[in-house]
Image (cartoon, rainbow, N blue to C red):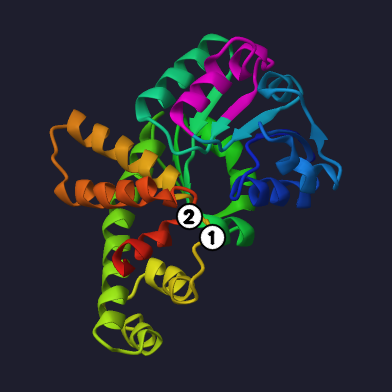
């Protein structure tokens, strides 16, 4: 059934996700702080709106994938924002990696105004977004998740509801903890092999088929060796995610040393001007 869908945030990942919704025949209402990033969608017939509240007032379901938790808070809870302007019954699905506590605040504020809310962060990077193979981790009421599911399936392959509001964010932060350690290993291993005189492509081809193999190694390894550090996922956003994970782990009494090592390395990269790189840009730190 054709629906009016709002989409807020058309960056590297959001643009492809929104495009899949259009491919399925839905009417799209879009907003991005940099309006030019909406042009591939408006060229296809999407309607560019003046702000998040305008998107919400025109839509049956609103999706968002934006930058920082403070941006999410402003878009949803700020004056004239999504929750204030959305019609009763509208479903709100924030796919930003954000704070579990903020997801719960949005859920409560939405319920108070007759709206529904889910948190549904994603993993899979730019390639997963383009190919609609993202993994989507969802928190929210079961009925609301079921309502969103046909649209989520247009954007992702593996979609799991982990529990009530905030659980999607917890799952995504755990995912980022795994990636933090993995990317350290990928970059250090490739740099060591090359510095020690091995053919790094031969090394990559050999080890990715063994127990050291991973999605990150197979997808980012070739980019690293090609000198391609363009963002599928920005370093600056990964730092934000790791800081959220560190804060959340502290709240439950955990001290994640490996996460903090990875965070410190990525902060060094950002301080050296690498914040706009993709996460594989960490390799440059070791090559220095």
The verdict on residue 85 being magenta is yes
Secondary structure, mark 2, is loop
Q: Name which residue lies at 23% across and 48% down.
A: 259
Q: Position of residue 230 (x, y in %)?
A: 54, 60
Q: What is the span of residues highlighted in magenta in the rendered image?
A: 68-92
Question: Percent x, y for residue 42?
Answer: 82, 42
Determine if residue 158 is in view: no
- Identify the mark at residue 277; answer none if there is no mark: 2
Please say if the residues under marks 2 and 1 sit with CB atoms less than 8 Å apart.
Answer: yes
Q: Residue at 58%, 18% (x, y): give it.
A: 115
Residue identifier under label 1: 230
| The one of 239 and 109 positioned closer to us in this rendering | 239
In which quadrant is the C terminus drawn? bottom left
Classify mark 2: residues with Cα within 10 Å, few (<14), some (14-19) or many (20+): many
* Residue ID at (62%, 35%): 63
Q: Quadrant of residue 208?
A: bottom left
How far apart marks 2 and 1 lie (CA) works out to 6 Å
């Amino acid at each position: 059934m054709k629906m009016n869908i709002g989409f807020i945030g058309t960056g590297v990942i959001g643009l492809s996700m929104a495009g899949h919704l259009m491919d399925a025949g839905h009417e799209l209402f879009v907003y991005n702080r940099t309006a030019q990033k909406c042009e591939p969608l408006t060229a296809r017939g999407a309607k560019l709106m003046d702000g998040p509240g305008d998107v919400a007032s025109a839509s049956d379901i609103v999706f968002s994938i934006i930058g920082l938790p403070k941006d999410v808070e402003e878009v949803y809870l700020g004056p004239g924002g999504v929750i204030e302007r959305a019609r009763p019954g509208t479903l709100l699905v924030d796919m930003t990696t954000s704070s579990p506590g903020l997801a719960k605040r949005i859920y409560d504020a939405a319920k108070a105004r007759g709206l529904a809310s889910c948190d549904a962060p994603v993993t899979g990077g730019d390639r997963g977004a383009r190919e609609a193979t993202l993994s989507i981790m969802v928190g929210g009421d079961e009925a609301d998740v079921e309502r969103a599911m046909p649209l989520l399936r247009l954007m992702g392959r593996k979609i799991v509801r982990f529990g009530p509001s905030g659980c999607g964010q917890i799952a995504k932060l755990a995912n980022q903890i795994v990636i933090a350690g993995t990317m350290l290993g990928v970059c250090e291993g490739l740099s060591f092999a090359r510095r020690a005189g091995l053919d790094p492509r031969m090394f990559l081809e050999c080890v990715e088929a063994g127990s050291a193999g991973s999605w990150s190694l197979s997808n980012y390894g070739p980019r690293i060796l090609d000198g391609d550090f363009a963002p599928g996922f920005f370093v600056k956003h990964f730092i934000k995610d790791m800081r959220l994970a560190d804060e959340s782990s502290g709240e439950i009494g955990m001290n994640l040393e490996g996460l903090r090592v990875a965070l410190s390395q990525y902060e060094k990269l950002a301080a050296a001007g690498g914040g706009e790189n993709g996460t594989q840009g960490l390799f440059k730190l070791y090559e220095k």
